[in-house]
Amino acid sequence: QVQLVESGGGLVQAGASLRLSCAASGRTLTGYVMGWFRQTAGKSREFVAAIRWSGGSTHYADSVRGRFTISSDNAENTVYLQMSSLKNEDTAVYYCAAASSRAIFTTRQGYDYWGQGTQVTVSS
């Protein structure tokens, strides 16, 4: 089992930056893929970014590429999502997820474990 706990959400103004953290525990994540998704009321959960725990290759949704950066600190068992130039449309609950598959999936079905989510609100 893998437990994931997100933190770092909050209320910011458009154009600001925010860093989300996802602390993982329960087992080693070697070979796992870690992802960030987001969801707003009435919409399906949307892929944001993913990173391979071993090797560090990354993948981003087109809507955030160039503004968001996903990274990992293997020693701390933590994954980060640095968000810059935030827009109103980035407002959502952000979820951290872990996949035991080495492939990077962009749909929620590819992930085995989920955190509880952290709210990010971007105001004009």
Image (spheres, helix red, strand yellow):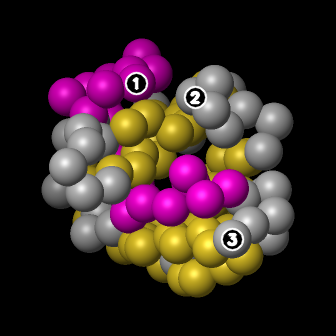
Which residue is at 34% across, 51% downward? Answer: 39
Kind of residue at disc 2: Ala
Q: How far is disc 2 from disc 1 in space, using C-alphas?
A: 8 Å
Q: Residue 30 location in percent, x, y? A: 47, 40
| Earlier residue among tags 2 and 3 | 2
What element does badge 2 sit on? loop
- In the figure, 19 relative to 29: above or below? below
Mark 1 vs mark 3: give the one in front.
Answer: 3
The quadrant holding residue 27 is: bottom left
Which residue carries the number 2 mark?
61
Q: Residue 50 location in percent, x, y? A: 53, 36
- Answer yes or no: do the residues labelled 2 and 1 have beta carbons within 8 Å? yes
Which residue is at 60% across, 69% downward? Answer: 122
Which residue carries the number 1 mark?
106
Q: How far is disc 1 from disc 3 in space, using C-alphas?
A: 29 Å
Which residue carries the number 3 mark?
124
- In the figure, 72 relative to 48: above or below? below
What element does badge 1 sit on? loop
